[in-house]
Image (cartoon, rainbow, N blue to C red):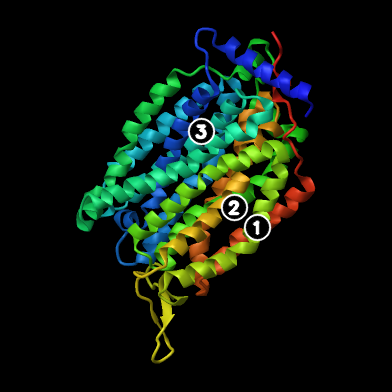
Amino acid sequence: MSKRGIVQSEEAARMAISGSAPKTQYSIPQVIIGSATGTMIEWYDFFIFGSLTTVLASKFYPPGNEVFQLIAYLATFAVGFLVRPFGALFFGRIGDLTGRRIAFIITLTIMGFSTAAIGMLPTFKTAGWFSPIMLIFIRILQGLALGGEYGGAAVYVAEHVPDNKRGFYTSFIQITATLGLFISLGVIVITQQSMNKASFEDWGWRLPFLLSLILVGISLAIRIRMKESPIFQQLKSSGMNSTKPLTDALTQWPNLKRILISLLGATMGQGVVWYTGQFYALFYLQTILKVPARDANILVGIALLCAMPFYTVFGSLSDRMGRKKLMMASLLAAAICYIPIYHGMVSAAGNGIVSVSSVVDKVTSAPKLTPMTLDAATGSAVPAKAATAANKPLLIFLIWLQVLFGCGIYGPIAAYLVEAFPAKVRYSSVSLPYHIGNGVFGGMLPLIGLYVCASTGNIYAGLYYPIAVASLCFICGVFWLKETHNTLIWEEAPQK
């Protein structure tokens, strides 16, 4: 980009912001905080469900088979991911038709009250099958809400900031996902430590869900005061916004082609890399390596906290180096390094796990999984003990390394997606490939990974899925993905 182009785009940004809110001068930090606060809370709401897997699986599904409970709960967790593309379409249409701001006020409200409802939901012991059915319904609402949230926040920030710093500023939205997971883990750990184990498993697990009401109230107060995106406001006032955003986004081949390339060459790989480093690592610690749940939450939480600054590092680098190079390098590094990293995690756990034993339950047909080690005296496989003497610093480093791969692709991807699509269908177009990539490819990862491990007995088999998806995405991205960091989206806004 020429110096003149940068100066013009920055000047356009300043003019648009001041023109959209003559009585309230927004600074870029205010725009980011207003968008990121709500997005972080929605991720908190979404992740609190996954972070409490080992506790809640027995609360909402029939007793008698712990692995069946776990798989059923993970399947319910996955439902929230599978419906996210539908939320992207529904709220994306609202965002492109009526405005970015109103769409993500609605999504925040739905997510907050849905999460609080889980905290008040009766367990299977009390309400029978009504309990898991209502849980699935709530997960659908959560998935729809999150499907509309991310695209709105990313687009809203991107349409306020200068073209030459879009990667840096939008990377703060990317931090909210990790921050939401970190806060969810922190709230769980604090709640667990404030009461005994029996009390937490009896009623204390409800508190993190109910806390959502307070957080959502604070965030709504911030968002209601926000103004509309200046680019969208100018498009709408000049009559240049789309009256049929879904039709324009999905039936016009040039835009549909961009959606498919963004999915196959960026977001599906980003989805599996990000979820491997955060959710699969957590499930693996607890379920395969038998690290106590509280310790596993703390280990992952520390790794996330140490990695969070790197979202902005990679976002800023992408403004200078380009989005594509960083995203492709991260995909390749993840695909190559996962197997060695997880060998290191097994060694660091210190309880000698070599395989998992799986027996099919005669009633539920679900595999019953037991981590196995070799008996020192006989050499035969025996059930492994809990990892009470694990090398925690090494485990934190290995999890941090996985999260760093996610930072490398997740940091720049919001800027790439915004730049890849025209403003009049941007909300719909950004949201769809992002939530298919994350919701379908990424969201199914814990369920697929653990089920493959249980079915094969191979404790590394669950990694074949993210390695395959990341590799395919790398190949598609190298050949089809276009570099976008020189795109001047402010040129789309009609000048007053």
* Residue at image coords 35%, 59%: 295
How busy is the neighbourhood of tag 3: few (under 14 within 10 Å), some, or many (20 plus)? many
* Residue at image coords 34%, 67%: 65
Look at mark 2 in the image and give the residue it sits on: 405
- With 283 as the anchor, is 27 left or right in this view? right
Asked whether residue 195 appears in the rendered view, the answer is: yes
* Residues at circles 2 and 1 in contact by the CB criterion of under 8 Å: yes
Image vertical order of residue 186 relative to residue 108, above or below = below
Q: Which residue is the extreme one toward the bottom?
A: 378
| Kind of residue sitting beneath label 1 | Ala
| First in residue order: circle 3 vs circle 1 | 3
Image quadrant occupied by the N terminus: top right
Q: CA distance from mark 3 to mark 2?
A: 24 Å
- With 443 as the anchor, is 357 left or right in this view? left
Asked whether residue 140 appears in the rendered view, the answer is: no
Between circles 3 and 1, the one closer to the viewer is: 1
Image quadrant occupied by the C terminus: top right
Q: Quadrant of residue 378?
A: bottom left
Between residue 428 and residue 409, name the one nearer to us.
409
Residue 149, label in figure: 3
Look at mark 1 in the image and give the residue it sits on: 333
Q: CA distance from mark 2 to mark 1?
A: 7 Å
| Kind of residue sitting beneath label 2 | Phe
